[in-house]
Image (cartoon, rainbow, N blue to C red):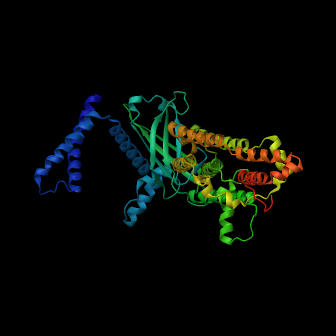
Amino acid sequence: MRARSAAAMIRRTMPEAWSAAYDWFHVIGLMPPHRLPFRGAALVASLAAIACLLTCPLAAVAADDACKELDSWLEKTGTDSAAYKQAKAEADANKIPAPEAIRFAVNELAKRPTPFHAELSSQTWPGRGTAWVMFEGNRIANIKDADAGKLCVRAFAGATSRQPRELTIKQAFLDTATKGDNVKRVKVVVEVGPAPGDLYSNVDFLFVGALADATPATFFNYSKEVTVANNRTATALTWLFVIAAYLLLARVTYKRDAEDQGKLERFTYVLSPIRISAAWYGDASLSQLQVLLFTFIVAGMLFYFWLSSGVLSDISKDLLILLGISAVGAGGSKFTQTLKSELPGDTARYLIGKGWYDWPLLPLRQCATFRNLLLTDGRLDVYKFQMAIFTVVVACYVVSSGQTSLGDVKISDTMLYLMGISQGVYVGGKAVTERTKDLEDAAKKMMEIDKLPASQKSARVGEYTEAEKTAAIEFASLYNRQIPKHP
């Protein structure tokens, strides 16, 4: 019986497919009506459309049938309501067109109990965002997999008002994987639409649907008052939160180190993320800047989703791995820097005794600069540049792909490997760099000459002065210190 019904349905659609193909070719200019030879192109297109109907699943056709039955049910529900009959009588008396029945159907169905259990994505929905409702019941559990496409759902906002708005259904499908219990549920993902008022507004929603299979169609309705967040207000508050947190961080980390700055120069210096994320001795740190960037991105988006949905968003495993890679890289970089800048005990004690550790630090603006962020010893550090490029790309991707939830952020394994390799090479490059050898050699020469008797020491004054000059330059470079005029 179903095969015969499907064949009859295809036969009915053949003239429509021919007409659609003809109109399409006419619109794009390939088949002017007065040039009949081009009808061959339309014939080819029609045959292709018929072949698709013969070979493709009939789920779409079945869904269209379900929607037709749903619309008919809504029309009948509306016209049968007492409110519609009264409105129609008034319209007839005033000789004006009868009102549309859909509004009265929505108002009527919003008062009826639902035959299914429903679960909302949250009690607060994001304005101009997406939310979902999960329907569960015996009728849904008995749907055959072959009939899963015979489903149609419509949604309305302001269901009890005089002007209910029909919303866009993003998806409506049979779901068995969400909770892993093999229980069939109908999941409906809907575009919520803008909030009507302040940050939070209560909105009446109505979901109506038709489950059409071998038996007569089963209709269902579900109404719920849900709090909807105004996305513009939520976005503004999120920016306010991020800016306030950043300004607080800038204030906490700021230390005035010069008096001869202009207002604009000082303002940009205070707000510089390179200065804020500077390493222990004030030099620009790419790994700490990366952690700072990802922290503000994730914190800002979590704050926005909390305002929009009333719950903190999940964070995907891939995003957690990315944050872990950044944190490990920053920690490894700091450990390596400390390890490679640490002097042997006798050398450190000797220089402490000479008062070198009391030399004033260089102004931070000379060390924590964009130039020093990418250069090493005045030359481009390709490892730093590589990590900087990948950081920017991944940050932009996280912002764009996490618009609905941070739990939806998926980062490919290859990109995570690449970020890990980039961090490893960056930290490894610091680990293999010998930064203290020249300083240690010069300091040993100074200690050796200092131990000599005064008569022998005077003969090696020039050698001592040269070693002291080399040691001072290396010490100042290693610890970002200013060399006094007479060290």
Q: Is residue 11 visible?
A: yes
Please say if 415 is above or below 476: above
Q: Percent position (x, y) of residue 451?
A: 86, 45
Question: How many marks can you see?
Answer: 0
Q: Percent position (x, y) of residue 400?
A: 51, 50
Q: Is residue 228 visible?
A: no
Quadrant showing the C terminus: bottom right
**Residue placed at 32% from the left, 39% from the top?**
61
Q: Percent position (x, y) of residue 317?
A: 58, 37
Q: Residue furthest right?
A: 454
Closest to the observer, 413 or 312: 413
Quadrant showing the N terminus: top left
Closest to the observer, 243 or 277: 277
**Residue placed at 65% from the left, 40% from the top?**
431
Q: Quadrant of residue 7?
A: top left
**Residue placed at 61% from the left, 44% from the top?**
313
Q: Percent position (x, y) of residue 49?
A: 24, 41
Closest to the observer, 228 or 444: 444
Closest to the observer, 182 or 460: 460
Please say if 97 is above or below 24: below
Position of 327 with respect to 2 (left or right) is: right
